[in-house]
Image (cartoon, helix red, strand yellow):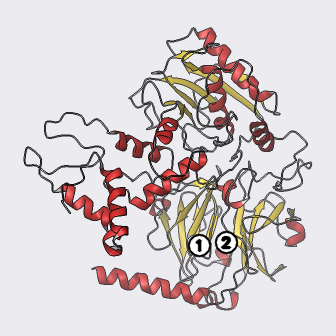
Amino acid sequence: MDKHMCSSVEKPSCLLSLKHFCMKRNFIIICSILPVFYVSLTSGAPTTSGAPTTISVTSVSPTTTPHTPTDHEQFINTLISLGYLPPTSNLATVTLQALEEAIVLYQSYHGLEESGKFDKETQAQMSRPRCGNPDKTTSNTDRGRRFMATSGWPSTHITWNVVNYTRDLHHEQVDEAVEEAFQLWSDHTVLTFERVSGTGEDVDIRIDFSEPYTEHGDDLPFDGPGHVLAHAFLPWFSKNKGDVHFDDGETWTHKSYSGANLWLVAAHEIGHSFGLHHSFIQGSLMYPYHSGYNPEYTLHEDDIMGIEFMYGDGTPDYNTQRPGPPNNPQVPRLCIESFDAIDVAVDGYTYVYKGDYYWRLELGKITDGYPKLISQGWPGLQSEIDATVTVKNALLWRDEVGKTFFFKGRAVWRYTGRSLDIGYPKDLSTAFPGFPNNVESVTAAVEINGNGQTFFLSDGVFYLYTHRRQVEGPYSINAFRDIPSNIADAVQLQDNYMYFFTKDLRYFQVSPWTFTTSYSYPKPTTDDWFECEGAARPLIIGTPSSDASLPLYNIYTALFMLIMALVSL
């Protein structure tokens, strides 16, 4: 095999050919290391200057002339930006299997032949003008999904303003197109919209036309004419939440069949601002590709189902139950409101608490018959608790193992099953000797099953309850990499990871060994935990485990990690 048989420009297609070459000859081991082998060969291939060739997508030639991406490089970059490949991928790191799977998934979403190849039909589809928001999110991993709903605005009255205009249209035309975009949605939702004069965070949806190729405040520069027309941010997004950005490198038009039609593009992006992901029902407004101007366009049934589910019309008719009785305004809506606390109880089920109510989760969804009143489930417990944890490590907790602690302010309740233990509630420092008196409340509590150590979070710091039954700290929350300070509560699941939930309806998966956040997090809490309508594949959570050896498994896992760390020294 000639080590120069594949150039960096031809790498994806050449690797596919090499794969088939290997498989025909049953070179199984060779094929498994082919991408790495290829990179080592091409990185050492001589150039005319004698310098090694660099195949990174951001590379430049020895003459410092800017590198123009090839078709294959642009193709991979597009798959990355749309969520089909991890953001760390590039020509040098993407594997054959990952590339083929990404292509097949893209083709399946858009009704193309699932060839796994970058064929003419796939190229044509990918070159169409579209929204820059990703197709493949954490929630829509299944094929054929209809609308995808995440968390909405806590209020049904939404404010908006145009903070920067395009040069293509008069201001009055832009205003009219945007108003008509809101009107397209308002005919099918209880939401009301008001234009205000502000430009800061007091405005819910800020609309901006941004210059292409330059940073405009979100690390997502536009690509100029063609392809990405605009992008928008979901309501729960911590930065730029609800904002809509248009690429001013496009030719924007109003009531015209030429250029990019501002009315329908704006209506699509505003759908994201309401909390909707892309739909793959062609003809729906939330389909990611722009179909051009249609003066007779009306909202598709799929879009109507999505917006009515999120904000209501009084008569829901979907297969997925909403959390709580929909006609009782006093019951919190977990699809749009952050909960107060979460815990895996001694019965193995996951319980979520909000206000006066609690819910039980089973197989990633709300169990039928819930929510119920906290006062009925746990007699003597107050509502609006701050945090809860059920302790399970017998080595640390001894006679307290299996008990559930609830926290509100400095008050602590301890339950055996559903019965309040005698002498409780107690002050925080009495229940856990050594807790500082200046700690006003515990906002989150999570036990590490393997060693029994328990983390108590409070006001941007955490305290550690050790195996010596001593309180240590405070330590900065920054010890948990990428975890924000607005934590609602935390829990550890059977996969050993800790899950931190924020008050803006996101959650983080965190390693208990390295304190680092897993790739692709944070994710919307509503998608995976409450099976809100539009969530595709919920986590299998909240169900009792039949594995009685789980604590022992955790010990073995911890010992294995320790041995590996020592070996690497």
Res. 396 in view: no
Quadrant that contains the C terminus: bottom left
Q: Residue 353 vs residue 463: left or right? A: right
Quadrant of the rendered structure where residue 78 is? top left
Q: Give x and y (percent) for residue 243.
A: 59, 32
321 or 451: which is nearer to us? 321
Tag 1 secondary structure: loop
The answer to whether marks 2 and 1 mark residues whose Cβ atoms lie closer than 8 Å is: yes
Q: Give x and y (percent) for residue 480.
A: 48, 63
For the residues marked 2 and 1, what is the alpha-carbon distance in whole angstroms?
7 Å
Q: Residue 284 vs residue 508: left or right? A: right
Establish if 198 lies above or below 20: above
Q: Residues within 10 Å of mark 1 (few under 14, many from 20)?
A: many
Image point (13%, 40%), residue name: 62
Quadrant that contains the N terminus: bottom left
Image point (18%, 49%), residue name: 53
240 or 175: which is nearer to us? 175
> Which residue is label 1 attached to?
435
Establish if 297 lies above or below 501: above
Q: Residue 215 vs residue 307: left or right? A: left
Q: Give x and y (percent) for residue 95.
A: 38, 60
Per the rendering, the mark at residue 428 is 2
Name the amino acid type tagged 2: Leu
Q: Residues within 10 Å of mark 2 (few under 14, many from 20)?
A: many
152 or 78: which is nearer to us? 78
Quadrant of the rendered structure where residue 99 is? bottom left
Res. 373 in view: yes
Q: Give x and y (percent) for residue 359.
A: 80, 64
Name the amino acid type tagged 1: Phe
